[in-house]
Amino acid sequence: MNTADQARVGPADDGPAPPGEEEGEEGGGEAGGKEPAADAAPGPSAAFRLMVTRREPAVKLQYAVSGLEPLAWSEDHRVSVSTARSIAVLELICDVHNPGQDLVIHRTSVPAPLNSCLLKVGSKTEVAECKEKFAASKDPTVSQTFMLDRVFNPEGKALPPMRGFKYTSWSPMGCDANGRCLLAALTMDNRLTIQANLNRLQWVQLVDLTEIYGERLYETSYRLSKNEAPEGNLGDFAEFQRRHSMQTPVRMEWSGICTTQQVKHNNECRDVGSVLLAVLFENGNIAVWQFQLPFVGKESISSCNTIESGITSPSVLFWWEYEHNNRKMSGLIVGSAFGPIKILPVNLKAVKGYFTLRQPVILWKEMDQLPVHSIKCVPLYHPYQKCSCSLVVAARGSYVFWCLLLISKAGLNVHNSHVTGLHSLPIVSMTADKQNGTVYTCSSDGKVRQLIPIFTDVALKFEHQLIKLSDVFGSVRTHGIAVSPCGAYLAIITTEGMVNGLHPVNKNYQVQFVTLKTFEEAAAQLLESSVQNLFKQVDLIDLVRWKILKDKHIPQFLQEALEKKIESSGVTYFWRFKLFLLRILYQSMQKTPSEALWKPTHEDSKILLVDSPGMGNADDEQQEEGTSSKQVVKQGLQERSKEGDVEEPTDDSLPPTGDAGGREPMEEKLLEIQGKIEAVEMHLTREHMKRVLGEVYLHTWITENTSIPTRGLCNFLMSDEEYDDRTARVLIGHISKKMNKQTFPEHCSLCKEILPFTDRKQAVCSNGHIWLRCFLTYQSCQSLIYRRCLLHDSIARHPAPEDPDWIKRKPDPHEWREVLGDCKEGPWSSFLKGTLHLQGLTDVL
């Protein structure tokens, strides 16, 4: 936690919170006060004043948003937007080769299924007969209820079909085959699927959980246990409704990644990662799916257990995960449309280090008819009790219910209350920053509230302030908000608001982004981060990138703090952060191209333009032309220069001597930055080479061919006389003894010539065939399919079937996630990008 965040969880010294609190039965905390008017807000202290800044671009949506909480932000920095026809997925990319100051967003889409989802409540013939019977029933309570219920009739007949999405939920990072997040999607017609983005442009449906759960219920005669009474007759309308309600999903949420033990055939136990997906149904039951990681499809489903919550009209759920003295506890927080909230115990069998509650814990039991719209749970550290605690917040109408849970010697302590006076309209969306517990709420009138928890001796209180989006975007209406994983950005779905007291004729839905942190806060959080991984903090480093591109320099305080970190620890994370800063600084010094690099040049049109009498300034003309037409332009200009109309233009690549005074200092600065970049890259390369050689030494026998260019790595490390690393020399000496003068060189797959190890980035054979080298193993990638990092650091090869297990396994995600975080290339896009990379045109895509 950085210094800026530490101030947020300390005691408040700016005076007591405003009055207007509604205490709960087990209360023990305080909350914010009620605002005196709709547009007024309690005055926050100067220490918590928030300045938001708009970031471009605003992403326009093709369709209207649908469902509750239509916006969700994943741990791998992808934003999902539920719309009436698809899920728009916006991925935030921090590209070190992009000189623009706007956000770089990669947009994909998950289309809604074309066919309606029919829940399996019996055989097809039996269901068809029952539907005809209920539709023709003379009892209006049966026929009208059946005809108007879209769960029974998803196709709609005379009504439009139920298309669109109701809710989406992102899994933790590391669940799919590429080590990224899975997307659980719930459609309006109650189809629950799991989607994965295995290549760059396409989303693939891995499994349909609604269909699998319906088959399981059908096999067990729609009984959850053998002790239940036998099933009723489907011709009974009550039984027809019961079978539908027990498999109609309301919400679903992912748990954190946990470790389970798997027993092999030789009775050996091995740890296997797994994740849980809890699905809340309309009748109050909860199905807990357990998936083995990486999740690849139906074969990855380990188990499915159903829990009876006993809650009437359930509306929302969320996972409660608590860690105390290295003991983890978990449960499910379930809220009702009538008001109650409670935690249900979840028995995690064969999960290492997890314990469960003995009985449900009631957080709020009053049936006050305030529906629970959204629930969030944030783990925090209590500075006074010196222990971990959980903050549970729930949106109920226009209020925020909060509950503080902590375990002491006396047992589980529960403190709860409500925060009032936040909004004059009901809360439509709520999100929470997991880094410091800050909660954000919004209503449809374009007002966002920031609630900062402040611990007291007993429980906590909230310091809150108003964010008027009308001051940033003008008059807008808000439909959903989501905060980025590290709390740097807030994504907001907006439409046009009222103008002169009139509503707009058409609604244009947009996803807008605003900053929640300053550059200084983002830099401090990056330096003090316990994650030490650039990919997991893309939102923070994008703020840093934006600042450097605007100011064209790295602030002195950041340089000094980073150098101290490198000298004291020497962790590769800080070296990679330094490399990122230098690359961004180098881009800020570059001249922005006036034309998109991917556009083709039209030489014929340029010739006509040069020869035409109405030609403009030669310098502006040359900036608009491609490199291939420079000679044609020069010829035309030389002819016209005889008449004295146009002066000879300068060439950007070769500056003339007369302009040396203005261009030489910039070129010298660029050369200086380039030299620093190469020095940092060489240091990181050597450190990783030592790690690769250490893996080779630990996993090989004498004179074994590992398919890794071991001899080339050794020679590369020892080629520089100034590089004197005792660890590297000792390691190379041990490996040389193992290899026993064997070299095991790589061979070109096209001509069978030897590929010498002369460059860490590419391998070139004697016939000129060029292959890129894998960053992880330094093997040559001799295939059309490889993986590439969106930070444009490097590429990685896919493991071959003949590779040993220690090469096939994924690297430590805490160390190399910024390299493999987005390595998901398809065959054709990879071939194209690989070709462009060889030609030095990686900036084109």
Image (cartoon, helix red, strand yellow):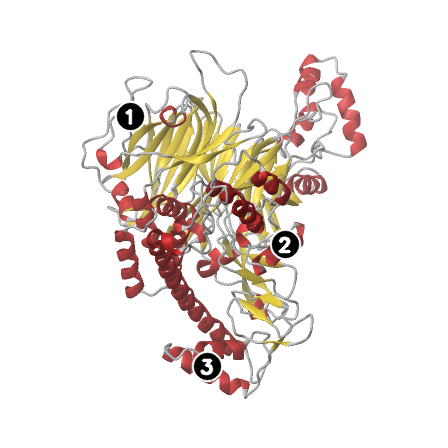
Left or right, 602 with reference to 644? right
**Mark drawn on residue 732:** 3
Q: Nearer the viewer, residue 825 or 278?
A: 825
Identify the element where label 1 is drawn. Answer: loop
Q: Is residue 365 visible?
A: no
Type of amino acid at the residue the image marks with label 1: Glu
- Front one among 465 and 220: 465
Determine the residue positioned at 60% across, 47% down: 197
Specify which label sits upstream in the sequence, 1 or 2: 1
Image-quadrant location for residue 214: top right
Tell me if residue 529 comes above or below residue 433 in the rendering: below
Image coordinates for residue 393, horizontal then vertical, percent: 39, 35
Find out whether the residues at labels 3 and 2 contact each other: C-beta distance under 8 Å.
no
Relative image position of residue 268 (x, y in whole percent): 57, 69
Q: Nearer the viewer, mark 1 or mark 2?
A: 2
Label of residue 21 in the image: 1
Identify which amino acid the numbered label 2 is placed on: Leu
Residue 377 picture location, percent across and down: 41, 40
Q: Are marks 1 and 2 in contact (CB under 8 Å)?
A: no
Residue occupying image coordinates x 52% and y 47%: 638
First reached walking from the N terminus: tag 3 or tag 2: 3
Instruction: Tell me whether circle 1 and circle 3 mark residues in contact (CB < 8 Å).
Output: no
The residue at which mark 2 appears reads as 832
